Image (cartoon, rainbow, N blue to C red):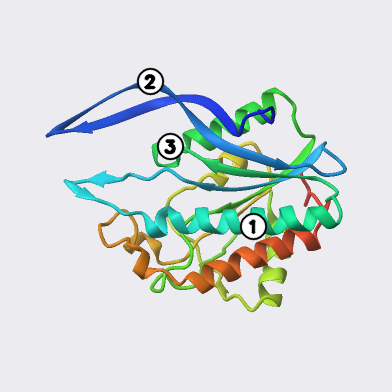
Amino acid sequence: MFGNSYYEKYSQDIIKVYGGGEDSKMGTINNVVGVIKGKNSKKAVVISTHFDHIGYQDGKIIRGALDNASGMSALIKVANNLKEKSKEKPFDMDIVICAFNGEEEGLAGSQAFVDEIISKSLYENLYNINIDSIGSKNGGKLALKNKSKVSNKLYASVKTTLKKNNIEFADTTIRGASDHMSFENEKIPNFFFVQENIKELIHKPTDTPDTLDYEQIDRIANAISDFVETNNGIMFGAK
């Protein structure tokens, strides 16, 4: 990881759908990871989203615009913003940009990434910002109730930045998991960007690009960039 390739290899069960059936076997696939190097490479913020999707369900193609092309577009915007900012002055920490595979298969990609980070002791301090399903016209506000036991300081600080950027959010939560849970399970501070009404919208043939508010996605991405810049080098109680 963090060598000459953007690909982080790991193994997971791969399901192939054909005709009227399907089969599965273990295979090697990749996360896509890039790093904006900072002054202190012992600490990092990991900004993540997942690029995999269920794709095909009940004989129908699921487009996956909200879940999770929206997150990928935001991640690319954040990466570009922070890369340009780093050219003016390096950040005080590494910024790790992660596009995870295998989220729909039990968070397999993010778990492999966290396992490698820990086993190789790549960072002494880090935290995670995860983006999954944002910008739906019918998705409601961001659902930002903190369910994490290790992320109180991080949540408070992100909410301050969102208020500054006039982005609405609610003290609500959703059922289900995303890649931030791989960090939570290792007691690494994490923040989850998601809308409150997505359960009625995702994993359906109607999850199409015309249902998204692209300006809202852009505003959230810019707010995340603002947060990282404003809190440069702060680790929010990370180990």
Q: How many marks?
A: 3
The alpha-carbon separation of the residues under discs 3 and 1 comes to: 26 Å
| Image quadrant where residue 39 sits | top right
Q: Residues within 10 Å of mark 2 (few under 14, many from 20)?
A: few
Nearer to me, 138 or 70 = 70
> Judging from the image, what secondary structure is the residue with disc 1 in?
helix
| N-terminal label among 1 and 2 | 2
Q: Residues within 10 Å of mark 1 (few under 14, many from 20)?
A: many
Identify the residue under disc 2.
26
Q: Is there CB contact under 8 Å for labels 1 and 2?
A: no
Q: Residue at x 78, y 60 (%)?
A: 229
Q: Residue furthest left?
A: 20
- Regarding residue 4, the answer to whether it shows in the image is yes
Q: Position of residue 188 (x, y in %)?
A: 68, 42
| Image quadrant where residue 1 sits | top right
Q: Residues within 10 Å of mark 3 (few under 14, many from 20)?
A: some
- Regarding residue 239, the answer to whether it shows in the image is no
Nearer to me, 23 or 157 = 23
Q: Is residue 36 left or right of residue 9?
A: right
Q: Is residue 45 left or right of residue 109?
A: right
**Residue type at mark 1?**
Val
Q: Which mark is residue 106?
A: 3
Q: Is there CB contact under 8 Å for labels 2 and 3?
A: no
Identify the residue under disc 1.
78
Q: Position of residue 197 (x, y in %)?
A: 40, 67
**Residue type at mark 2?**
Met
236 vs 116: above or below:
below
Q: Residue at x 30, y 30 (%)?
A: 15
Q: Which mark is residue 57?
A: none
| N-terminal label among 2 and 3 | 2
